[in-house]
Amino acid sequence: MQTTLQKIIDKRKVSIVYAENDADIVVYCNSVSDDWAEIIQCCETLGCPPFHLVLISDVDWDEDLSPWPAGKVISSDDHFEGRAQEHLQWILEKVVPIAPQGHRIMAGYSMAGLFALYVPFISDQFDAIASASGSVWYPQFYDYVVSHKPLMNPSAVYLSIGDRESMSKNRYLQRTVEITGQIYEHFKALGMNTCFELNQGNHFKDYELRLAKAITWLVKERVKVG
């Protein structure tokens, strides 16, 4: 059984799941839920090497994970306030000091995947990035990626998307698969070790499995280089 530590910090829940075996890789992940067990189980099924997981939940999803303010582009419930830099600073100041130390990976799904992709442009503190079904449709995000240089090139980047995620009447969502592929090609052109995976299904299919596939690939790549 995994050893865990759970803390409430500034109304957010931080769940630290320690690897059962020695590990020097720490995966940080913003999540809509504090349910880490299925993610870990999927990783184990996929043969993932040991890693520590830091799951951050009770996040203000739109507000904290968006890179800059945007209007109500998806629904009338949107609250994109652009607090990603603030949220990352909070992670570095409040969460990293209580977490295991080692090579840091930032992973996420949906808006958390968008946040993960934004991280290397505003910080040099994470070695690798995983964006599973990332919200790359976000206004001006692709233009930002191709016009800015990361503060530190990640050792590896994993991108995935569902093959039905662009089947939408919304003009932003219609470009999700296309933009994910374009970001993949851009990172490859920069010489980054980058993986792109097209999964079956829409945005809401196999959340834990898609995230676990992302984590597993990155951890294996990190283990390769030592």
Image: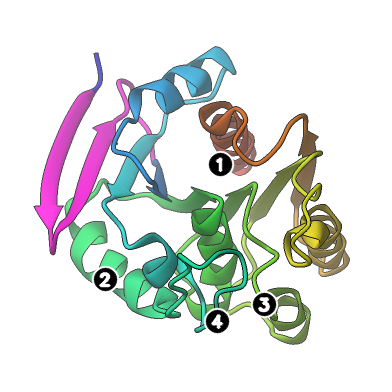
Cβ–Cβ under 8 Å for marks 1 and 4: no
Image coordinates for residue 185, horizontal then vertical, percent: 87, 61
Which amino acid is tagged 4? Ala
Question: Which quarter shows the N terminus?
Answer: top left
Magenta stretch holds residue 23: yes
Please give left or right for residue 70 compared with residue 32 in the image.
right
Q: Which secondary structure class fits the magenta region best?
A: strand
Which element is circle 2 on? Answer: helix
Please give the label number shown on residue 226: 1
Q: Which residue is mark 2?
A: 90
Q: Magenta residues, as a range?
A: 3-24
User: Which residue is disc 4 drawn over?
Assistant: 70
Q: Quadrant of residue 140?
A: bottom right
Query: Residue beneath label 3, please?
Result: 139
* 47 sits left or right of 147 in the view: left
Contact (Cβ within 8 Å) of mark 3 with mark 4:
yes
Report the residue at 43% width, 74% height from top.
Answer: 84
| Callout 2 crowding tier (Cα within 10 Å): few <14, some 14–19, many ≥20 | some
The mark closer to the camera, 2 or 1, is: 2
